[in-house]
Amino acid sequence: MDVKIFEELRTVLTQQNQTGEFPSWLMDEIMGIIDNAEQYKNKKLLIETLTSQIGNFDLYAGAGCFDTGVSAEAIQSTLRQLNLEKEGGQCELIPCCNFFADKFRHMPKTETYIKKRLCFGDYLSCNRFKIYVDFGKENLPPDLDPTDAEEVKKVIQCLRNKKRSNQL
């Protein structure tokens, strides 16, 4: 196990905590990851991403001209990914994902292929899952096709604008 990435995570987290602006609720969860490093030993890329995000944390990220920093929400999204990958298996949205409801009734092989590839495979790359993680289940359009890149872009832009207007 590469202990150095967890030591670096601890160092960056400690530095951010000394500023007094880093959210304590995030601090506790990240310390839990550091204290249980063995469970996250195969998540080097996500740990490095988390470390970089913490180093660039800005309490005012996304507000006006402070758009270069990383927000608590972005860090929380990476934490969710870490925990979901640690648990492994399948997408947690499968029981309630409306994407397949009647959509592929006459194309069972297509439905099986997509479910196998995304729902039971690389679900972290599914655009529906990404929207769920970043914006919440309540903001996930029931009929959004995860492979329709243009529609996904529109939905994400709309949700970002909604989020910004709610922060003002």
Image (cartoon, rainbow, N blue to C red):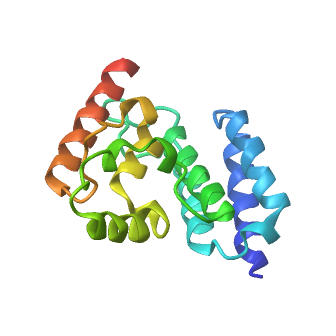
Quarter that holds the N terminus: bottom right
Residue 127 appears in which quarter of the rendering? bottom left
The residue that appears at 42% across and 70% down in the rendered structure is 116
Q: Residue furthest bottom?
A: 1
Q: Residue furthest left?
A: 150
Q: Nearer the viewer, residue 24 or 106?
A: 106
> Would residue 30 be found to the left or right of residue 58 on screen?
right
Q: Residue furthest right?
A: 35
Rendered location of residue 31, percent (x, y): 79, 51
The residue that appears at 48% across and 50% down in the rendered structure is 94
The residue that appears at 45% across and 61% down in the rendered structure is 119
Q: Nearer the viewer, residue 1 or 90?
A: 90
Residue 18 appears in which quarter of the rendering? top right
Rendered location of residue 145, percent (x, y): 24, 51
> Would residue 87 be found to the left or right of residue 94 on screen?
right
The residue that appears at 76% across and 59% down in the rendered structure is 10
